[in-house]
Image: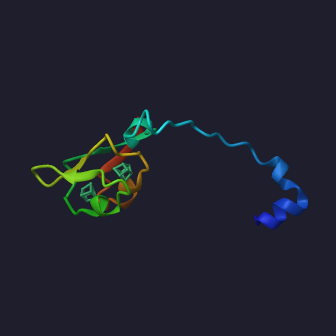
Amino acid sequence: MSLYFYFMTEAWKEIEEGAIIKHDAAKSPKTGDWRYMKPQVDKKSCIGCGLCFDHCPEAAIDYDSERKANIDYDVCKGCGVCATVCPQKAIKMEKN
Ligand code: SF4
Ligand code: SF4
């Protein structure tokens, strides 16, 4: 639906209210502090292709000594991009 439609028909009154989660960056500077979902890497399935590494917006992925994806949970914000791009489906998102 277009914004015009919502405005002219007053359909906006039917839209559910959203929620805003308060966050104090001074108290929790690490993005991982407010993560809701958490990626888990299945190291047996990971082939070390680097796609998750390339796409992670927080640069939270590195390789371990066996060139398997390794996630830094201090800065991972749980967006799930890594799980989406992984060709091996080696990353699963779980509740934090
Ligand atoms: S995208 Fe998947 S297979 Fe590739 S390095 Fe990341 S976890 Fe491993
Ligand atoms: S969930 Fe998002 S922030 Fe966390 S490692 Fe994956 S792509 Fe990076």
- The structure residue drawn at horizontal position 62% and vertical position 40%, both measured from the top left corner, is 20
Image height of 20 relative to 61, above or below: above
65 left or right of 59 in image: left
Residue 48, percent across and down?
19, 59
Q: Quadrant of residue 8?
A: bottom right
- The structure residue drawn at horizontal position 37% and vertical position 40%, both measured from the top left corner, is 30
Image height of 3 relative to 18, above or below: below
Residue 70, percent across and down?
22, 48
Q: Quadrant of residue 87?
A: bottom left
Closest to the observer, 27 or 90? 27
Residue 83, percent across and down?
37, 53
Q: Most extreme residue toward the front, as rendered?
A: 26
- The structure residue drawn at horizontal position 35% and vertical position 57%, both measured from the top left corner, is 56
Residue 61, percent across and down?
27, 52
Q: Is residue 47 visible?
A: yes
11 left or right of 81 in image: right
- The structure residue drawn at horizontal position 85% and vertical position 60%, both measured from the top left corner, is 7
